[in-house]
Image (cartoon, rainbow, N blue to C red):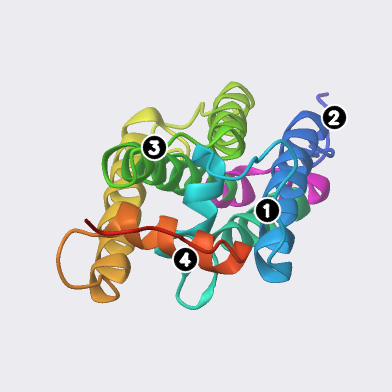
Amino acid sequence: MKHATKRTPETHGREWGVAAIAAAGLAVSGYLATTKLMGAAALFCETGSGCDVVQASRYALFLGVPTAAWGAALYVVVLGLALAGLPAGRWLAAYALAVAAVAFSAYMTWLAIVELGAVCPWCLADAAIAIALLAVLLVRRPASKARRSPTRPARLVGIGLVMAVGTVVFSAGVFAAGAPAGNASYQEALARHLQASGVIFYGAYW
C-alpha cells in the first residue's frame, strides 16, 4: 500500500547577493541625491570635472527631484524584495526594475557624453552596480520547469524590451519637456555651476 506524501511548499530564502548589490546601489544613489539637495560637491568631484558638470546640469533633476533619488528609491524596493525572498512573482518585479535601472543608466551615460561632453565616475559606478544587479538576478532566476513558467526566457526577453524601451522613451520625454531653447546643455551646466560657486569673471574687450 502506497502512502501519500505531502509536498512541502517551496521556500525562498533571502537573496543576500542581490540584497548586497542593491544596498551598494542605494548607498551611491543616496549619496549623490543628498549632495544634490544640499548643493554640495560629491567626494572626488573637483570643480569643473565631468562629475561636477553632470551634477550641475538639468539632467541632475528628474520631475523636480534629484535624479539619483529615483535610483535610491528603486534600490530600496529591490532590497526589500531580496530580503523577503524571490519566488517567481517577486523575482519578476526585481528583474523589471533592474532592467529599467540598466536602461536609464545607459541613457544617462549617453546624455553625459554626447550632450554635456562629460564623464561622471559616480554615474559610471552606479551603472556598473545596475548591471551587476541584473546579472546576479539572472543567475538566481527561479527554476522554470513548467512550459508556461512566468520566468521562461522568451517572456523575460519581452519584459526586458518593454521595460528598457519604455524607460528610455519616458525619460527622453521628461527631459525634452524641460529642455532650454537651443543646444546649450553644456554651457547651461557650466554657467549654473560657476554661479553657484561664486566665480566672478573679469575681462576686457579690445
Q: Which circle, 3 or 2, is nearer the viewer?
A: 3
Residue 192 has which mark? 4
32 over 38 or under it: above or below: above
Q: Is residue 118 left or right of residue 162?
A: right
Q: Which circle, 2 or 4, is nearer the viewer?
A: 4
Dot 3 crowding, Cα within 10 Å, few <14, some 14–19, many 20+ = some
Identify the residue at horizontal 53%, vertical 43% (top origin): 48
Q: How many marks?
A: 4
Identify the residue at horizontal 41%, vertical 38% (top origin): 118
Alpha carbon of mark 3 to alpha carbon of mark 1: how far? 31 Å
Q: Which circle, 3 or 1, is nearer the viewer?
A: 1
Name the amino acid, label 1.
Leu
Name the amino acid, label 2.
His
Q: Which circle, 4 or 1, is nearer the viewer?
A: 4
Alpha carbon of mark 2 to alpha carbon of mark 4: how far? 76 Å
Residue 156 has which mark? 3
Q: Is residue 90 magenta?
A: yes
Do residues under tags 2 and 4 come within 8 Å of each other at their CB atoms?
Answer: no
Per the image, label 3 sits on a secondary structure element best described as helix
Residue 102's x, y, as percent? Answer: 46, 39
Residue 3 has which mark? 2
Do residues under tags 4 and 1 come within 8 Å of each other at their CB atoms?
Answer: no
From which residue to which does the magenta span run? 81-93
Q: Is residue 44 left or right of residue 148?
A: right
Alpha carbon of mark 2 to alpha carbon of mark 1: how far? 60 Å
Per the image, label 4 sits on a secondary structure element best described as helix
Of labels 3 and 4, earlier in sequence is 3
Residue 43's x, y, as percent? Answer: 75, 41
